[in-house]
Structures are given as C-alpha cells and as structure tokens.
Amino acid sequence: MATTVPPIALSAEQAEALYQLALDLLGDLVRIDTTNPPGNETAAALYLRDRLAAEGIASELIEPEPGRGNLIARMCASSSGTPESTSNDGLLLLSHLDVVGAEPDKWRVPPFSGEIVDGEIWGRGTLDTKNLTAIQAAVMILLKRLDAPLARDVILAATADEESGGRWGVRWLAENRLDLLRASAAINEGGGVAAEFGGKVVHLVQTAEKMPCPITVTATGEPGHASTPTDDNAVVTLSRALVAIGSRRLPVHITATYRSFVETLGGVIGGIRGALAQQLLNPSMVDTIIDRVAGDPRKALAMRAMIRNTATPTVVNAGYRINVIPGQAEAQLDCRLLPGSSSAEVLEELRAVLRDVGLAGKVKVEAADQDVPAVESPFDHPLVGEMRRAIANHSPGATIAPLLLPATTDGRYLRPRGIPVYGFTPLPLSEKTEGVHGHNERVGLAGFRFATGVLWDVISAYCRMT
C-alpha cells in the first residue's frame, strides 16, 4: 500500500500570501480581453510569462497562429536533474486563457474590469477559467519560493482557443507538441463544484465528458408557389422531425463513470434513500428516481444527460423567398456522445425516433466525423485520493464523487493519449456558477479562497517528495 504524503503545510501568513497572489493574478488576467474570437491569448500568455520569470520560473510560448499563444512552464522534480526533464510522472495544471464574448450593457460591473464588489470578483473568466489559471500559477510560484522538494514535475499549461474547439490550443499541442504536456495526471476545468444529495455535500470530480458529434437533418419536398399549399412541404416535414427529436429521450446507457457516481452517492446518502439511489442504475426506473433524488430541475437535466446521448436542435435553414415553398429544409443538431458510443449508434437512435413518427425515408440524418473518442479517467487514481483528502480537510463531512460532464473541455484531447484528466476547480456549496457564459460572471472571494487552499493541498501533496 502506497504511503500517503501530506500536503506542504503553510503558515497563516503563507496561506494568505498564496490567496492574495492568486487574486492579484486573476484580476490582471480578467483585465486582458481574450474574447474568442479573435482570442488574442498571446497577451495573457506574455503577462503570465513575465510573472513567472520574475520568480525564476522559465516558460515557453507556443503560438501556432499569430496572437493565439499557449504558455507552458515546467518545474522539474528535484530528483530529475535538468530543466530539460520531460518526466511522464508529472502533474499537468491545465486551463485556458480565452473567454466567450460579453455584452457590457447587460452587466452590473464592466466585464473586463476585475472589480471586487459585494465580496465577489467580477468579470469574464472569473469562473471559466482564468480563476483556475490564476490559482495554478500562484501554487507554482509559491512552490518555487519555498524551494519545495518535488517528487514529480509540475507543468503549467495556460492555453488558447478552448471556447472554439482547441484548434490553436490543446488540440494543436496534443497533435504537435505532446511532449510538453506528458504527465501522469492533469487537473483541468469542468468539475469540483459542490452539490447536495440527500443532505450530504459532494464535490463532483469530472472524470469523463461527452464528445461533440454535429448532426445534419435534411428534409426534402415538392417546391412550388406558396399561394398553393401542398402536403409535401419540406419545412413542415423538418419541423415534425425536430419536434420528435427535441421531445424524445434517447435510450439509457450506463457508463463506468455514471455507475461509480451512483454507487458513491448511495454510500454517502446511506439508509433507505441510499438504497433508493441505487435504482438510478435501473434503466426502467432511472428517470423517476432522478426526479426524486435531484431535488431541482436543473440538476435533473444534468443527471439525465449523464445517461443518454443527446441531440439538441440549434440551427434551422430553409427557404429564400416568402412566396416560394423550398424543396429542401435543413437543421443542425448539437449532439453529445457518451463514452463508448459512436456516431453510428446515435444516428440509429435518431432514425428510430423518426420511424416512430412515420418519417422513415422522408428525413435524412448525417453525422460529422468525430475528433477523438470519449475516454473515461479512473476514479481510483492517486490524484483523486488527494482530492478526497483535501475536501475532507477544508469541508468536514463533505466528500467527492465522479462526474460525467455533459459538455466538453480540452481534456478530451488528452485522455485518448494516455493522460488521465480530472476536472476540479473546487467551490463550496454557497458558490453559484450561473454566470458561466452568461451576464455578470463572478466568483465569491470566500469561494476563491476555498479553491486556492484545496488546490494547494492537492498539488503539493501529489507532487512533494517524502
């Protein structure tokens, strides 16, 4: 049995300095507008490069496209010898520097101000994911200041273009410079936030995510003059197809991550309610039990997305003149695939829906090629053990459970290449995250302090030398 190594203990003054450093970095990063498109992540990468250089930490700026900068910094394990070490046993601290757009007139506080108002720091990126960048960089800097003996390399990767698919960020790095990212595990976005189940606080660690699989739905019909309606109108046929797809739940699939999620919840809740939670693994009862266990509609939607491939109509194109019945109508579906599923499988699930409403052969569904397969990270990894211990230390009575994220992150490009990725930006139950991609994005200072302390414990314990 491996010996557990405790995190590096900090004095009250050192812990406060770590928090203030992370907060300072976050405010500065928010004030650098990296809205994607166009991105301009190089400006933020250069800022980080200078802050790290001032602490004696070397880094490399990778710019696959002008303005689309990725910053990679590595602190080598004390036993690895040279700065050129590329140990596969390192810990990758992954985040992205780009943010989605903001509408300033809809915000209470200017979105690129980084202002602190009402005990919260406001601005685009305070939750997605400049908060994680700032904490990870601050942890690296303090490890350097303390001259901490490291048994594993610590690699910081603050990357570009996550919000648009990673073409100039992690996807490019994984395809062209994977040597810079090789590690035994990675901490990324997409998890860590606390939720309540059966009165128990559980921090959800993202161990898997669904894969995008864009699907095109096409209906054809008889074109003609709109003054003479026909029974073969492509727009009407497409509408029927979209209503059927949008209102139907696709078949249930139980993945390893979801099974572990349910089993963990059952153990945490305990008693009769815990036994009831185990019925979340029963395909015939799962939807009924989700309604009883989830407690609110948003949580129920997220849980249902963990057990199904999903297909959401988002874009519709048809016609070019109001007085012409078009011969074709087309829609795009944002489809997300579970680990183990394929585009062929979800296409058959959608065709079954169309058959049930009498549209077999009248509507065509086609899928785009998938970038990479969906891969699950093991929940019994040593890094996860450090997360469990850190949460228990900072939030007595709380624990962790695996999460299958219905959305996607840059982690999808690394898991298939053998790097286990864990979404973990820990925030307490009191912290709300509705501002992600919305108006008035912000994070509470208390929640940010909590995240900083937890991540210090996780990173320093996993990487320190005994």
Image (cartoon, rainbow, N blue to C red):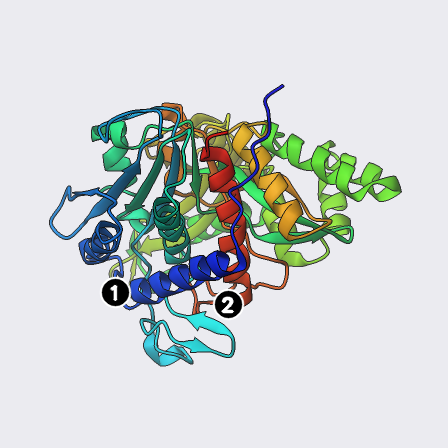
Depth check, front residue: 145 or 106:
145
- Is 406 situated left or right of 284 in this image? left
Q: Is residue 115 left or right of residue 319?
A: right
Image quadrant in which you'd find residue 380: top right
Q: Count residues near mark 2 (Cα–Cα under 10 Å), then give few for <14, some for 14-19, many for 20+.
A: some
Instruction: State how far apart marks 1 and 2 are (Cα).
Output: 20 Å
Q: Please say if 154 is above or below 126.
A: above
- Can residue 215 be seen at all in this image of the molecule? no
> Considering depth in this image, is 198 or 1 the residue closer to the camera?
1
Confirm whether residue 193 shows in the render.
yes
Residue 449, numbered circle: none
Tell me the amino acid under the disc marked 1: Ile
Q: Which mark is residue 445?
A: 2
Q: Nearer the viewer, residue 348 or 145?
A: 145
At 57% from the left and 40% from the top, the residue drawn is 387
Residue plotted at (41% across, 46% down): 333
Disc 2 element = helix
Q: Position of residue 227 (x, y in %)?
A: 34, 65
Instruction: Identify the secondary structure beneath mark 1.
Output: loop
Residue 312 placement (x, y as % from top left): 47, 48
Q: Quadrant of the N terminus?
A: top right
**Amino acid type of disc 2?**
Leu
The residue where tag 1 is placed is 32
